[in-house]
Structures are given as C-alpha cells and as structure tokens.
Image (spheres, rainbow, N blue to C red):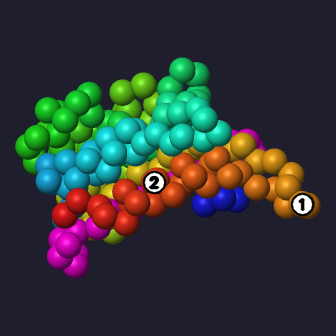
Amino acid sequence: DKTYVDKYYGMETRFAQVVLKSTTAGENILTPAGLNALNTVITAVRAVSITWEGSTYSYTDHCYRTGSNCWESNVLTAFASAAAWDTQSEIDTALTASPITNQDGSTLYLEKVAGGLTYNSASAPTGAVALSATFLFTNNEELVSGDMVDKKGDAFDTELLKIFAEPPT
C-alpha cells in the first residue's frame, strides 16, 4: 500500500498492483495456466506507452528503477522464462526451494505475491487462490493550485487500469 511504498521507497514513487484470482472460487491459480495469465498482464503493462506534452513515454521511461531494472514484484521473478513454468512439476520444484530465489539473486517471499496459500504436511506450498503483480513508477508530482498532482502519472495509470479491468481468464 501507499504507506509501505512511501516508507521504503520514498515520496518519489507511485505504485500499481493487480491481483488475479481463479474464475472458480477457491481453485488453485499457482498453475501453468495461472502463471501464463499473470504473464499476459505483466507483458501488457510493460508494453504501455503514453503521449504526454508531445513526447512518448514507455513503461521503461516511467518505471522506478533499482539499479538498471524496473522494480516489480511477482511470482514470475522466480523463473528464468515461461518455459520454466510450463508444467506443474516445474512450478512445484521452484516454489518449494528454501529460500525461493529470484533471477536477480534476491529472495522471493511467496506470501507477498500469492494469496490464499495452501501447504502440504511438509510445509511446501501446494496452491494459491490469488497472484499479484506490483509495479513501482516514478512520481512526477507538481504543486498546482495548492495540490500535489501528477498528471503524467495519472495518464499512465489510466492505461494500466484498462489492462487491469480486463484480465485474462
């Protein structure tokens, strides 16, 4: 949420988050189909661009960077590519590692990117009913008539909301 983002990333960031859930209540979405659906949304977000004051801004122009990478948080960061999650066995193997390691070497905390997790008797995850993807973006706020506004960021958010409103099934 905004309080967390402001505390750990500062006021120079804004965030967007999408949560995908199964179309059948309680059904596991930590599956190849679920991860493909999440990947579809993430790919669409990365393809967003806007025209603002005569210039075109892409996702990579607008994202908040940690080093050279745009900051994102989602379960897919634990996999090298889509081919690495194309079977349930591959997903289970990757997500039962301790710790689960992202491709950049950092630790993935599954409970931060998946909701309604279920576990087996060995405490290994066996499913989730929701998956999230969180993105940080640069805040371009300016003081306008006594209020802080980010019209460029709002224009970018409008495009994101179109994607989030029509998630894949």
The N terminus: image quadrant = bottom right
Residue at the far front in the pictured view: 54
Q: Is residue 24 magenta?
A: yes
Question: Is 168 left or right of 141, judged from the image as shown?
Answer: left
Q: Who is closer to the viewer here, 59 or 88?
A: 59
Q: Is residue 44 left or right of residue 168?
A: right
Q: Is residue 80 left or right of residue 14?
A: left
Disc tally is 2
Q: In this rendered view, identify the residue nearer to me: 39 or 159.
A: 159
- Is there CB contact under 8 Å for labels 1 and 2? no
* Residue 50 visible in rendering: yes
- The segment highlighted magenta reads 7-27
The vertical placement of 156 against 61, above or below, is below
Residue at image x 58%, y 28%?
A: 66
Q: Which residue is rendered at x = 49% and y = 34% of the image?
A: 58
* Residue type marked 1: Ser
Give the residue type at disc 2.
Answer: Leu
Give me the C-alpha separation between circle 1 and circle 2.
27 Å
Residue 100 visible to the viewer: no
Q: Measured from the top left, where is residue 51 in percent x and y?
A: 54, 40
Residue at 68%, 52% in the rendered image: 151
| Badge number at residue 159 | none
Q: In the picture shown, does residue 2 fall above or below 43? A: below
Q: What residue is shown with label 1?
A: 145
Q: In front: 141, or 99?
A: 141
Name the spot of residue 77 as percent of width and height, x first. Answer: 35, 36
- Residue sitting at 50 percent across and 26 percent down? 69
Give the image location of residue 44, x and y in percent: 34, 45
The foreground one among 17 and 32 is: 17
Q: Secondary structure at mark 1?
A: loop
Mark 2 sits on what residue?
160
